[in-house]
Amino acid sequence: MEKTSKNIILIGFMGSGKTSVGLKLSYKLRRPVEDTDKLIERREGCSVSEIFARRGEAYFREQETKLLEDLVRTGHECIYSVGGGTPVRPCNRPLLRQLGTVVYLRAQPETVYERLKGDTTRPLLQCEDPLGRIRELMESRREAYETCAHLTLEVDRMAPEAIAEAIETYLPGAHG
Ligand code: S3P
């Protein structure tokens, strides 16, 4: 196993459970959890949807990279749940791995679709055929997620608690 630093980074497609797993893990390991989308929203003073609408996706992606650079400098013993598209920019991948142990929550497109149908907070899925879009995006991101991850978990049939347990098992010395 690679030597891991102290942060834990959860990556994966929208709806793969990063937020719920982050909360479970935070409770188990007694560490704070931060959601990078929320950190960006706080910096920008508006929601991710508003950032996409007003400034465009490219601007949002720049903010993701800036935030990662800042977290690498300042982040400490934390759990970070990061936006589904963050690993796509090649320069973000070494930053994520530098930040800590990267855990990829891999879900099937159908699982994501079932969880997110009706959701209006993900600008990339506001389209006529969200399942088709999920399949397409997931396929195009597969390599990005895989090259980033220290650990990959298939999460379709796992509850957040069980996923958090699996992560904890993988991380000797993660307590304290
Ligand atoms: C995105 C995922 C979202 C958010 C933005 C773009 C993506 O985060 O960053 O809507 O490109 O997959 P979640 O994965 O937390 O939904």
Image (cartoon, rainbow, N blue to C red):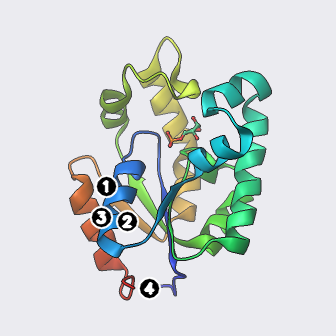
Residue 113 point in image, percent of width and height: 36, 28
**Mark 1 residue crowding within 10 angstroms, few (<14) / some (14–19) / many (20+):** few
Task: Specify which label sits upstream in the sequence, 3 or 2.
Answer: 2
**Residue type marked 1:** Glu
Mark linked to residue 121? none
Depth order, front residue of 74/110: 74
Q: Nearer the viewer, mark 4 or mark 2?
A: 2
Tell me the amino acid under the disc marked 4: Met
Q: Which residue is mark 4?
A: 1
Identify the residue at horizontal 32%, vertical 32% (top origin): 115
Q: CA distance from mark 4 to mark 2?
A: 23 Å
Find residue 26 and name its label. Answer: 2
Disc 1 vs disc 4: Cβ atoms closer than 8 Å? no
Residue hosting label 3: 164
Using the image, tell me which numbered label, if any, was put on residue 154.
1
Left or right of 3 on screen, residue 17:
left
Task: State left or right for residue 15 relative to residue 2.
Answer: left
